[in-house]
């Protein structure tokens, strides 16, 4: 198996952290996104949507989309379970994971991709070119304030995002928050429960990678 990664990018970090939590060792190939390697025909053969992460299995099957990579790894390496052991756990974890992907990751991507100079004409990932819409960057900032409020309420009542144990939902939430923190949207002082949870998850060895 091979893992196509990019050290600074948030989406492959989700899979990198998942792999580390599983305690498995997968050879890594760094993809030069800044140099446009992901837009070349050789990479498009691995992932027609031209994004990282990608897992290339030994039989040649390629799996892109961070959560799909995690889904495969969970099935192939069940211990420790990070996506739930029972039907109820699986549903609840998927609910929280999807929610923070939408409210955190997508909002953060709206902000960055619609404002950064270097992403002019690249407002969406993939082979097609899309122009930036500055209003979407502004909307993204507002959405992050709502996200912090929602998470503070949740972490006031629950140790981890999806309940009593660490799961893939915490991975997605941590990386979404670190992604927006890099865009100068730090955890607000009036959100102490988010800070408590962020400190705890950031201290895990898998979060250092
Ligand atoms: N929905 C995809 C998003 C993947 C994604 O956007 N990856 C970024 C790096 S964080 C990328 O490959 N960007 C390429 C580009 O900017 O064209 C997933 O979950 O894997």
Image (spheres, rainbow, N blue to C red):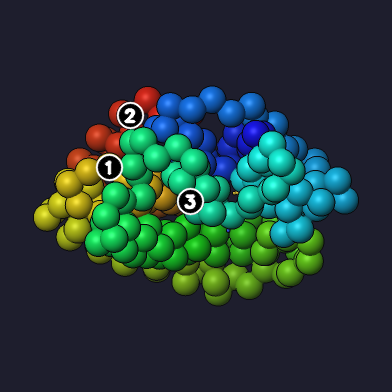
Chain-order first, disc 3 or disc 2: 3
- Residue under label 2: 204
Residue 135 locus on image (x, y percent): 55, 74
Q: Residue at image x 47%, y 71%?
A: 139
Along the line of sight, the residue nearer the viewer: 107 or 163: 163
Determine whether, in the image, residue 71 is placed left or right of residue 152: right
Camera-nearest label, 3 or 2:
3
Which tag is nearer the camera, tag 3 or tag 1? 3
What quarter of the picture does the N terminus occupy?
Answer: top right
Q: Compared to 64, does 21 lie above or below?
A: above
Residue 35 x, y percent position in the rendering: 80, 41
- Mark 3 CB near ligand 1 (8 Å cut): no
Tell me if I can see residue 17 in this picture: no
Which structural element holds mark 1? Answer: loop
Contact check, label 2 and label 1, Cβ < 8 Å? yes
Which disc number belongs to residue 71?
3
Earlier along the polypeptide chain: callout 3 or callout 1?
3
Ranked by sequence position, the earlier of labels 2 and 1 is: 1
Reading the image, the residue beneath label 1 is 166
Please rate how many residues cluster around mark 1, counting C-alpha atoms within 10 Å: few if below 14, some from 14 to 19, many from 20: some
Nearer the camera: disc 2 or disc 1: 1
Does residue 151 appear to the left or right of 56 in the view shown?
Answer: left
The image quadrant of residue 198 is top left
Residue at 31% of width from left, 29% of height from top?
203
Task: Measure the alpha-carbon separation of dots 3 and 2.
Answer: 21 Å
Q: Secondary structure at mark 3?
A: helix
């Amino acid at each position: 198996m091979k893992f196509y990664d990019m050290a600074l990018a948030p989406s492959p970090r989700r899979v990198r952290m998942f792999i580390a939590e599983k305690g498995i060792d997968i050879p890594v190939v760094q993809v030069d996104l800044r140099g446009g390697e992901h837009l070349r025909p050789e990479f498009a053969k691995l992932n027609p949507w031209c994004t990282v992460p990608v897992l290339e299995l030994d039989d040649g099957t390629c799996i892109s989309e961070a959560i799909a990579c995690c889904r495969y790894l969970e099935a192939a390496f069940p211990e420790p379970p990070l996506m739930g052991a029972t039907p109820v756990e699986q549903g609840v974890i998927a609910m929280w994971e999807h929610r923070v992907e939408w409210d955190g990751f997508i909002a953060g991507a709206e902000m960055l991709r619609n404002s950064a100079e270097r992403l002019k004409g690249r407002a969406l990932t993939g082979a097609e070119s899309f122009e930036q819409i500055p209003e979407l960057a502004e909307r993204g900032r507002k959405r992050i304030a709502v996200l912090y409020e929602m998470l503070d309420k949740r972490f006031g009542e629950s140790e981890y995002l999806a309940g009593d144990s660490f799961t893939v939902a915490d991975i997605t939430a941590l990386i979404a928050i670190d992604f927006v923190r890099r865009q100068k949207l730090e955890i607000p002082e009036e959100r102490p429960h988010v800070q408590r949870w962020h400190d705890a998850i950031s201290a895990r060895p898998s979060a250092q990678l």
